[in-house]
Each structure stands twice: as structure tokens, then as C-alpha cells.
Amino acid sequence: MLNIAHLSKRFHQNLVLNDISLTVQKGEILGIIGPSGTGKSTLLRCINLLEKPESGHIEIGAFSMELTGGNRRDILELRRRSEMVFQQFNLFRRKTALQNVMEGLIIVQKMSKSKAEIIAREQLDAVGLSDRLYHYPQHLSGGQQQRVAIARALAMRPEILLFDEPTSALDPELTGEVLDTIKKTADMGFTMLLVSHEMNFVRSIATRIIFIDGGKIVEDGPPDEVFNHPKSERAREFIAKMNRLSGPEYVI
Ligand SMILES: Nc1ncnc2c1ncn2[C@@H]1O[C@H](COP(=O)(O)OP(=O)(O)O)[C@@H](O)[C@H]1O
Ligand SMILES: [Mg+2]
């Protein structure tokens, strides 16, 4: 489904991703964990070409391209196959919830307005926001804004969904509703890459975990194995620290 080969990215002298290769199967929920500043966001951003790496090849389904090159059509095709949900929601401020979800369908997928509206309503309903269709982002809570962003991503029917710390900008009491929505999405069978420091949540929904440190994938395995028996000292330290910091168990 997703295959990344030899991905390297540097910012000036800082080699953030050092020759990363990664294969993700269809339906897999890949939890990506690691210390702050270790390149988790950069990895997701390179997959979507929001950052241009120094080297790397990507395949998503039947589509493949060099991440260093690619014409406009390739880049659009890549982005059609993967949708990102950002920490800061990135909604259009001057559009309603409904218009936010319709936008990509109309502009990118060239769908008619009436068809886009039907899909947008369905998706907003699926994230529990059918009573907020005409609200602007500023009149929605952070949790509701993030659910609009998830509905917008799902509406595009991507092959993979990329979540970059989707709850870290939210007040704690709003985190649960967004995690519930992500859990529902996972249950629908989407292939997902999820960066989050909600360790209990990642552990409960991921089918596989990678731990990134020093530009490399240091651990890669089933959640129980990575969390209970990390091979590297660095992951052991990180997980012990996160366990001390983490709040109550996330109950599904
Ligand atoms: N646009 C940028 N310009 C320069 N350095 C950057 C940029 N984006 C990220 N970095 C650096 O790359 C490293 C990895 O960042 P990031 O991928 O955001 O880490 P994480 O998401 O794991 O916290 C950090 O050292 C960060 O400072
Ligand atoms: Mg980040």
C-alpha cells in the first residue's frame, strides 16, 4: 500500500531523516512515536511533499514517484492519495464547516457542487457534526474544528490518512471526542499513520508502532512488544517517561 525507500531530509546541517525506509500494509494503523524534534512531522510532511527531501522514493497503491522530482501532476496525484490532519486544524476561516469539507471535492476532484454537498453532509454527520454545518471555525470548539478537518480528509477518500499530533492543540476535555473520531476512522479500515503523544491511545488503536530517534526507525513492531519490551535504551527511557506523564487510561 505505502512504500517509502531511502528517504533523507536535512534542514541545513541537521540531518532529520537519515535514509528511512518503511512499508505500511493496507488497513494498518501505524503509530509513530519518539522524542520531540525527532522528525515525526517531517516524515509525514515529506510523504505529502509539504517538505522536499534530499532523497526518497514513494509508492502509494499503483502510484510511484521520486520525492526529489515529480512534476505538478505527480505532486497532485500524490496528495490525492494521502490526506493530512494537522495539529492546528488548518481550516479555512471564512468558510463554514460544510464549505470546508466541500472545497477539496469541488476544486481538486472537480465534483459538482450538489454532489460535493451530499458527501460533505454525510462526512460531517459521521463525525457527529450534522448540527454544525453552517458554523464558521471561530464559532466551533477546537475539538469540533478538528472533527471538521477529519471529515474533510475522509471526504477525499484518500488511500492513506496522516495524522500529525491531532489532539495536541486541544484542551484536555476536548481530546476524547477527537480520539473517538479517529478510533471510528480506524475501524472503517483506513490505512493510517498517526503521530501522537497520547500514548495510551496510540497503544490501543495502533496495529504497529515505530519509534523514531536520531533520524532512524529504532523500534518497529506490535504495540505490546514496543511498549513492553523495547530493544533500545532510548525507547525504554522515552516510554517510561511518557508513562509517568500520561493521564488516565483512554477507554474505548
Ligand atoms: N522548516 C524547518 N526549518 C528548519 N528546521 C526545521 C524545519 N522544520 C523542522 N525543523 C527541524 O527538524 C527537526 C525535526 O522536526 P519535526 O519533524 O517537527 O519533529 P517532531 O515532529 O518529531 O517533533 C527539528 O530539529 C526541527 O527543529
Ligand atoms: Mg511534530
Image (cartoon, rainbow, N blue to C red):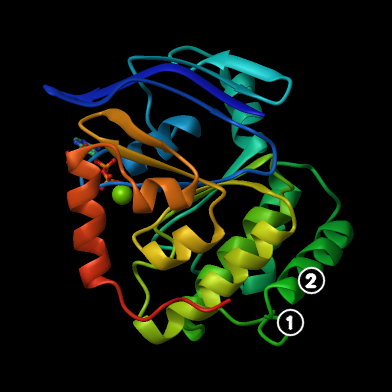
Q: Which residue is mark 2?
A: 121
**SS for dot 2:** helix
Front residue of 251/87: it is: 251
Of the residues shown, which amino acid type is indicated by label 2? Arg
Residue at 59% over, 35% down: 79
What's the CA distance linking mark 1 and mark 2?
7 Å
Q: Where does residue 77 sit, x and y in percent of width and height?
A: 66, 28
Residue 96 left/right relative to 137: right
Q: Quadrant of residue 10?
A: top left
Disc 2 crowd rating (10 Å Cα; few below 14, some 14-19, many 20+) is: many
State how many labels appear.
2
Q: Using the image, tell me which numbered label, if any, was put on residue 160.
A: none
Q: Using the image, tell me which numbered label, if any, was put on residue 130.
A: 1
Q: Where does residue 196 sit, x and y in percent of width and height?
A: 39, 57
Q: Are marks 1 and 2 in contact (CB under 8 Å)?
A: yes
Disc 1 crowd rating (10 Å Cα; few below 14, some 14-19, many 20+) is: some
| First reached walking from the N terminus: tag 1 or tag 2 | 2
Q: Where does residue 174 sit, x and y in percent of width and height?
A: 44, 82
Of the residues shown, which amino acid type is indicated by label 1? Ser
Q: Where does residue 162 sit, x and y in percent of width and height?
A: 52, 46
**SS for dot 1:** loop
Residue at 75% over, 58% down: 188
Q: Is residue 179 above or below residue 7?
A: below
Q: Is residue 150 above or below residue 158?
A: below
Residue at 38% over, 46% down: 226
Residue 124 left/right relative to 89: right
